Amino acid sequence: MNIWEQIITNHMLLDTLTAWLLAQFLKVPIHYFKTGQRRWALWFSVGGMPSSHSALVTSAALSIGLNEGFNTAAFTIALTLAMVVVYDSMGIRRQAGFHAQQINMLVEELLSGHPVSEKRLKEVLGHTPREVTGGVILGFVIPILFYLIRML
């Protein structure tokens, strides 16, 4: 089997990429229903609901567990990676976003009328617990759904 056949028949990869793409796609309609604003750029940005990072790593870990077993080294590595990514997205990256908000506010106050730079720091770096939970749920649903379909 050549490399392309291996890739397109890799259920774990397809489950994972589907969860990630669906999470990215859902950001625009969810944001629209929350705010009434269409922000197409959300398809290509970090942050927002649901967390595509959380969906990606959760889906990878669960898909590996379902397809190769929950007592494998691959599942252990995937679960560990998922835990680090989820923690990072809610913790460290979220705090970096808060810092960016505060720095942007200080710059606006200090330099009002005398802008040195118009470039603002990116404030949406991490996720709220709700956004991460949405990503984790999506990351659970996709591989289970695909696994059940493949079992038919």
Image (cartoon, rainbow, N blue to C red):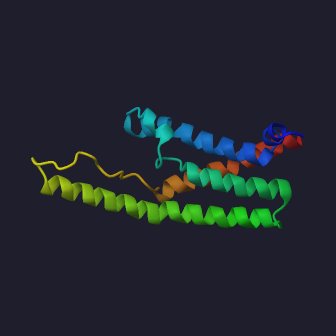
Query: Residue 51, image x and y in percent?
Result: 54, 50
| Left/right of residue 8 with respect to residue 27 in the rendered view | right
Quadrant in the picture for the C terminus: top right
Q: Residue at x 54, y 56 (%)?
A: 132
Q: Residue at x 84, y 37 (%)?
A: 5
Residue 82 falls in which quadrant of the image? bottom right
Whether residue 14 is visible to the viewer of this picture, yes or no, is yes
Q: Residue at x 83, y 67 (%)?
A: 71
Above or below 87: residue 133: above
Whether residue 30 is visible to the viewer of this picture, yes or no, is no
Query: Residue 44, image x and y in percent?
Result: 49, 39
Q: Residue at x 80, y 45 (%)?
A: 11
- Could you tell me how many numbered marks the image carries? 0
Quadrant in the picture for the N terminus: top right
Residue 134 vs residue 64, the one in the foreground: 64
Above or below 47: residue 26: above
Query: Residue 4, image x and y in percent?
Result: 80, 37
Above or below 87: residue 68: above
Query: Residue 9, image x and y in percent?
Result: 83, 40
